[in-house]
Structure formats: structure tokens, C-alpha cells
Image: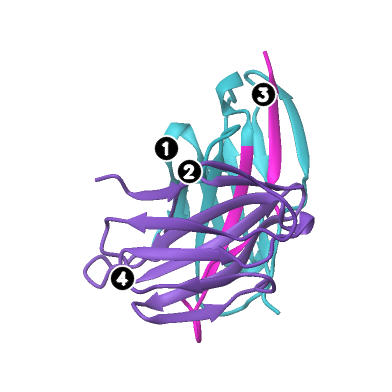
Amino acid sequence: AQSVSQHNHHVILSEAASLELGCNYSYGGTVNLFWYVQYPGQHLQLLLKYFSGDPLVKGIKGFEAEFIKSKFSFNLRKPSVQWSDTAEYFCAVRYSGAGSYQLTFGKGTKLSVIP
Amino acid sequence: NAGVTQTPKFRVLKTGQSMTLLCAQDMNHEYMYWYRQDPGMGLRLIHYSVGEGTTAKGEVPDGYNVSRLKKQNFLLGLESAAPSQTSVYFCASSYSLTGLSYEQYFGPGTRLTVT
């Protein structure tokens, strides 16, 4: 079965530290990739997405992600985190083929930013 | 536009009781989904719909039923609630024929407790 792996369950950083959250998927075909953020007590919101073209994607709030096809990865980065980035982050993949409207979500990485 | 809305926001049920969660979207999306979110489990797909009058099972469909009588609404029913169904339920929608985008838009969630 197709899957999405987020290796870090909980990341704790101090403000101004750099962030990189890992995301790997299992499929070798055409994929669309997404990062969602869920602030405490809120619903999931789209941070950024990759469909095609430049593998370096810029999203909202200073986040970016790089699609590395050879590594089946789509890692999320931010150069300098803020306390307000404390949230849970979900990577999601749309695999091409039958049922291709569905997204497969990773289990999420909780980010805690210490002031 | 309200986006995706869900009612109710909170509910407490006794074991064996039934209830219906309502999801509505005003983006003319073709696809709608119901997820449950549990700590450490990420998002798990319960049921989904690819169009009015059609529904299909997701990853964890047991104990739930759904209906999509109107394009904009997707109902999730629990016929006989069990404590294992205590969770946060999110509705999402995606894909308009004009937009050709597969990102999912999420509702604010329903926190359900079954005692």
C-alpha cells in the first residue's frame, strides 16, 4: 500500500532556530505533494503544494519545501522559526492512478517552539 | 465564501446512541471526505464521495455510514456509538472541474466524546 512517512513525531526548537521536517513517500510514479499545518485546536490549513515545475516550493509564513524525486522526499523547511509556528505539520501525497483524488497523509510531526 | 462548515462543533454521546454529523461546502467541489483524527494516528479516512449520490469506504469505515444527497452536503452517521469512536472528526472537500486542483479544504472539526 502507498504510504507517507514523517520520521519525527515531536520536534522541539528554540525561537530563531532553523527547521527541517522530513517526509518520504513510497510511490515511484507521478505524485502531487502537500504540507498542511494544524494550529492547536484548529483545522488543517494548506501551507504549500507541489504539482510540477520548480521542485523548490515556497508557501505561506516563510515555509518552503523541496521535492527530491530520486529520494521520494518532500521536506519542509523554515530558516527561522517563531513561537507562533508551534503546531502539528502533516505531509500528504496524491498518487496518480485509480482513486487519484484521495490524499494519503503522514501521521504528523508536532513542533514546539520555545520562546 | 464560508468554505467547509461542520455541525455540531462538540457532542457527547452515551454508548449506543446515534447521531449525524453534517458537512457543507460552498466551493462547488466534486469530492468530499470524512476523516477521524486520533493522537499519534494522523488522519484516517472513514468514507468519501466522488459525487452526488455516490459514496465509498475509506480506511476505517466500520461503525459509520454516510450519505450525499446534495452535492454540497456530506453526512456522517453513527448508528450505535461506541467509546472507540471518541475522536475529532474532520470533513474535507476537493476538486472542482474548473479548478483542477486536488488540494483538500478542511472544516473546523467536530469533537465527539462517547461515554
**Chain letter, colour purple in render:** B
Q: Residue at x 46, y 64 (%)?
A: B75
**Chain letter, colour cyan in render:** A
Have a look at marks 1 and 3 and say if they share a chain: yes
Magenta residue check for B5 = no
User: What range of the chain is rendered magenta?
Assistant: A88-115
How far separated are the C-alphas under marks 4 and 3?
48 Å
Disc 3 residue crowd, few under 14, some 14–19, many 20+, Cα 10 Å:
some
- In the rendered image of this protein, does residue A25 appear above or below residue A7? below
Q: Position of residue B47 (x, y in %)?
A: 55, 72
Disc 4 residue crowd, few under 14, some 14–19, many 20+, Cα 10 Å:
few
Q: Amino acid at mark 2?
A: Pro
SS state under label 2: loop
Query: What label does residue B108 carry, if any?
Result: 2
Query: What label does residue B70 carry, if any?
Result: 4
Q: Chain of mark 1?
A: A
Q: Amino acid at mark 1?
A: Ile
Q: Position of residue B100 (x, y in %)?
A: 30, 69
Q: Position of residue A28 (x, y in %)?
A: 61, 78
How far separated are the C-alphas under marks 2 and 1?
20 Å
Which residue in the structure is indicated by mark 1?
A60
